[in-house]
Each structure stands twice: as structure tokens, then as C-alpha cells.
Amino acid sequence: MDTRSYRERTIDGHALRPESLMMSYGYDPQLSEGALKSPIFQTSTFVFKTAEEGKAFFELAYGLRQKRPAEEPGLIYSRINNPDLEILEDRLTIWDGAEAGLAFSSGMAAIATTLLTFLRPGDVIVHSEPIYGGTDFLVHRILPQFDIRRFGFAAGAEGALERAVEQARGLGRVAILYVETPANPTNTLVDLERCAAVARALGDGGGRPLVAVDNTFLGPLWQKPLEHGADLVLYSLTKYVGGHSDLIAGACLGGEPLIAPVRGMRTILGTMADAWTGWLVMRSLETLKLRMTSQMKNARYVAEFLADHPKVKRVLYLGFLEHGDPQHDIYHRQCEAAGSTFSFEIHGGEAEAFGILNALKLVKLAVSLGGTESLAEHPATMTHSDIPREAQERMGITPGLIRISVGIEHPEDVIADLAQALAAV
Ligand SMILES: *Cc1c(COP(=O)(O)O)cnc(C)c1O
């Protein structure tokens, strides 16, 4: 085996699938005493062989000169780079077909660092609604302190994106089109190709807004935004990618020209993930396809059970979209499967929803999603409680709505638990 083979993605012209690359890609055992698994590089700093080498590493890290052919960036200090992050980043890029990627200490660290890289005072960010609570707080409460304004458009509403962009242009330069699809907790889809077309129409090259997509809910298996015209993909790795509800991390992926300034911002803000978290996410990536596939299959059984239940009014599951619905068309173009986080509305309000949540035994009452265990929560009073009541109603976040993230348990056990909880109210 030649020493470069750890970066091979093909065998005799046969392209290896992402799941086959997750165990070894980007890691050279010969650099670590032959260890099969990457060690945890629990170190703050790295020893240079010579002063000249240290100088060269800094020149590259700070962009003081172009990289020479075949020159690799050297290890300097763990806020700038660390082997566990570099290997993880190489593996993350594979799923989305991205050129480059960065790992962060949380999904919010990834989102905030990326937005601060590309937004300037006077700019406007146009975003889909609803969006994740932390992101919502960032655009409503933090960014305005830097004279950056926002304009929201309702996910799924015909013409809403175009109208929002037109109005936003009156406020300032539209620098970012920020999209979360499917929207949480309603699973409403936003058409990414349409977003990319709207962005392009605002001017080519430097003038047009970047399309940034939070792909936490369906990615990286069931939706690949870069293939639909997005410029940047963001993740909370805490959810499906981490998958065991035991870590907090985030990522930003895209072309190297866009990732390079985000990398520089990350170095200065210090929002990178640590070596131990990077190692844990690599552990998780090995089973990502197994877990997400099992969860996706289980979720269909659970959704079908709920849809047939007399106490359930509606189930907002992507697999139930019908022909003729514009959302169905987007789903077929953009998504490869329905995922495993969805909401259902029961007959009744908060009291009945709480009764069900309190009666659950196997399914745990907790926010977050994407882990091996099934979780349920009440969006109106928990994850989306800071959205005013009328806005909640407009977005379909009713008092009878329960969100569930289906795990890898036996689906009949999850259904038995839901059946007894529904019977209890
Ligand atoms: C959880 C989540 C985030 C924030 O991620 P953290 O890792 O908790 O910082 C962002 N977007 C979505 C869609 C999420 O579900």
C-alpha cells in the first residue's frame, strides 16, 4: 500500500460509496504507530521540526502566500488545526460532495461564524420561516446590533421568497439567502433550485447573495443542497451525524473559495470543535448510514400508525405528500427519503398533548433529535416557545402539535408506547 492510499476514493476506477470511506478515509495509520483508529490528538500545540517549517506553516495558515504544488498545511495549534478535525472534515465533505469543510464546537457556532464571515453592516439576510430557535434569536436580536437586518419568508408559500427578496432589497444589500428545509417542526419544504435562481438573478459573481442551507434535518443522507445550487451547507452535527445524543458539534461545507474566509474567522473567534469531539463524530460517521436508514424505515411505520389513530388529527410526515401538491414536487426533486423527525397534531390542545408526553415510557420527553433513541417534545411550549402565539398559529405550530424523532428501537415497541400514551388521554 502506498502512503497516499488513505486518500483514494476509487479502486480500479470503481468509485467507493461514502459509507465505505467513513472508516478509514483521510487517516494514515503509518503516521500514528500503525493504530487502526485515529488517536485522539489531545494537545494544544504542535512541535515544529525547524523554525523554517514553522514560518512556512504560518504563511499558509494566515494566507500570506499561495500554497506551493503538493504542499500540505502543517499542524500549528489546535485552534487553527488538529488531526482529529482535519480527518473529520475530509470525511464530512464526502457525503455532500463538497470541496472543503469545517468542524465547529456546535451547530450555532457554525451558523454564527459563517454569517459573521459574509455579512457587513447595512446588509440584509433573507431567511425562511420558521427557523431553528437559536438562529431565529441570532437574526432577530444579535445581528441588528451590528446594523444587519433580516427579512423572513414563509416556507412553502407561493411567491413569498420573491416578494421577500424584493422588499429586502429596499433595506440594503441582500448578502445571504438563508434556508432551513424541511422547516422545523412542520416539515414544510423550500425549493432550493428556486432559491439559487433568485440569488443568481440578483447578479453574478461577487454581487449576488450566497445561498446557505441548514441541512440538519435530512442531511447528509437524504438531501444534498450543493447539488441543488446552494453555496454553503450548515449542520448541527449534534443531531443525526453525532447520532448518540452525547456530543455538541457543527459543520460548514462548500467550495474552498467560500470556506477559506470562514476558516479564518473560525480561527479568530475560536469556534472550532475540540479533538475529543472530532474523534467522537468520526466514531459516529461509521454508522451514519445504518442509523439513518433504520430510523427512516421505523419512522414510516410510526407515521402510518399515527395517521390511522382516531385521536390524531394530522401527521406532518414528508412520505404522506400527495401528487398535485407543490410540496410533493419539491420533495421528489430535492429529497431522497422522508427522514425520521416529524410532527403530529392530536385532537385537543396543550393539556391533551402534555397528557400524552407525560405517559410515554420508552420514548423520552426531550428536545433535540436524530439520536439512536426516540424523543418527543411539544414545540409550542418548548423548542418554539419564544415565537409569539399568532405567529405560531400562522406557521402551524398549534397547542396540539407533538414533534417526534424516531430512533433505532424496534418500531413495534415505539408504536406500543405511543398507543398506550394515546390511550391514557
Ligand atoms: C439543533 C439545531 C441547530 C443548533 O445546533 P447546536 O448543535 O445545538 O448548536 C441548528 N439548526 C437546526 C435545524 C437544529 O436542529
Image (cartoon, helix red, strand yellow):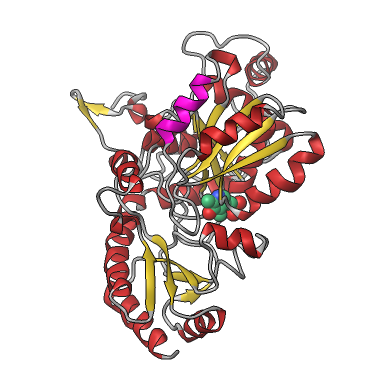
Is residue 263 shown to the viewer in this render?
Answer: no
In the picture provided, is 53 more to the left or to the right than 155?
right
What residue span does the magenta drawing correspond to?
Answer: 192-201
Q: Which residue shows up at 39% across the image and 35% down it?
A: 96
Q: Which residue shows up at 71% across the image and 38% down it?
A: 270
Is 176 inside the magenta-drawn segment?
no
Q: Nearer the viewer, residue 13 or 294?
A: 294
Q: Which residue shows up at 32% across the image and 82% down it?
A: 416
Q: Main secondary structure of the magenta part?
A: helix
Is residue 121 shown to the viewer in this render?
Answer: yes
Q: Nearer the viewer, residue 70 or 309?
A: 309
Q: Quadrant of the N terminus?
A: top left
Could you tell me residue 385's position as x and y percent? 64, 65
In the picture provided, is 224 more to the left or to the right than 248?
left
Q: Nearer the viewer, residue 411 or 82?
A: 411
In the picture provided, is 262 more to the left or to the right than 242?
right
